[in-house]
Image: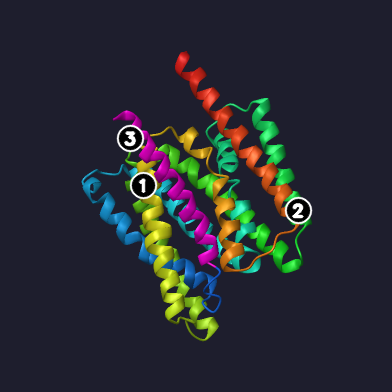
Amino acid sequence: MEFLKKSRAFVSLFLTFFIWGSVYVAGKMAPNVPSALVACLRNCIGVFPLLFMARRYFHIKVERSDWKYFLGVGVLGYFATIFLIQMGILLTGSSTASLINSLSPVSVTVFAALILKEKITPMKVLCLGLALAGAAVITAGAGGQGEITGILLVLLSVVCWGVASVNMRQLTAKYPPIMVTAYGMAISLIFHIPSGIIAAVQNGGTGLDWKAVLVLLYLGLIGSGLGQYTWTATLAILPASTCSLFYPLQPLFSAILGALILHETFRPSFFIGMALISLDVILSTLETRRLSRLEEDR
């Protein structure tokens, strides 16, 4: 029974990273809709299934001192991160944006060390070096100023997610993860809705057509709703360090889908960057697991 349970968890893990990888490709399939509006509508759609899944925890009272952390999760994690990623996708390739975003576990490690004073080891320093090298190789191979700007925007989103994740760590020690996610998404709408309206006005319209509506439904219901659910369900069975080992699957799925659907082509710098970043994520995750075991043995 335990083997079957873990087997299902691994299938769920593959599904999660396939969904997250596909989000980058889908995000480029509504080019006439302003980026801020795409991010807004995606969260508006995605928040409903998350609130539905979190409804059993609504009775839990949030301590007043914790609301600032929920605000950090909402503003940095689900507003700034998604907005910057969407901007980056339109300026650079979906596969490149996904690859840069797979640096998220490293960003979390760095900010956990800076803010939560978690231990910095030589291996973590090596991982940071690999992350910077991978990002530098990809940026150096960019085809123009617009693509470089897109890469930098996605890198900034990784920084925002790292800081938000530190807040998440503090909150999930006291509250259920799905509750933290749902509340964070709901708070992000306070910022997404005004920015989406402003973007539509500046664009002279929403740019929506039937294709864009289908893309937005996919991004909201599948990308945000189902993706967050399968991730949370997997974390309930497998250790976070094990789950993070699969992060390199995200840019791999994005690259495959980008080539098949968007007919994207890849420079050698993309594959060199993918190798560096994948090695970086794996080493970082293994180091996190090693430190966790040492902590448990004390």
Give the residue at mark 3. Answer: 5
Q: Earlier in the sequence, mark 3 or mark 1?
A: 3
Q: Earlier in the sequence, mark 2 or mark 1?
A: 1
Q: Are marks 3 and 1 in contact (CB under 8 Å)?
A: no
Of residues 267 and 91, the one drawn nearer to the viewer in this rendering? 267
Q: Which mark is residue 127?
A: none
Q: Nearer the viewer, mark 2 or mark 1?
A: 2
Outermost residue, bottom side: 204
Measure the alpha-carbon separation of dots 2 and 1. Answer: 37 Å
For the residue carrying disc 2, how many other residues have a C-alpha within 10 Å: few (<14), some (14-19), or many (20+)?
A: some
For the residue carrying disc 3, how many other residues have a C-alpha within 10 Å: few (<14), some (14-19), or many (20+)?
A: few
Residue 91, position in %: x, y? 65, 68
Q: Which residues are magenta?
A: 1-27
Q: Which mark is residue 180?
A: 1
Q: Amino acid at mark 3?
A: Lys
Measure the alpha-carbon separation of dots 3 and 1. Answer: 25 Å
**Residue 193 seen by the camera:** no
Of residues 9 and 116, the one drawn nearer to the viewer in this rendering? 9
Q: Secondary structure at mark 1?
A: helix
**Residue drawn at 36 percent across, 47 percent down:** 180
Q: Amino acid at mark 2?
A: Ser
43 vs 204: above or below: above
Q: Secondary structure at mark 2?
A: helix
Q: Is residue 97 magenta?
A: no
Question: As drawn, is 44 to the left or to the right of 263?
Answer: left
Q: How is the image coloured?
A: rainbow
Q: Secondary structure at mark 3?
A: helix
Q: Nearer the viewer, mark 3 or mark 2?
A: 3
Give the residue at mark 2. Answer: 269
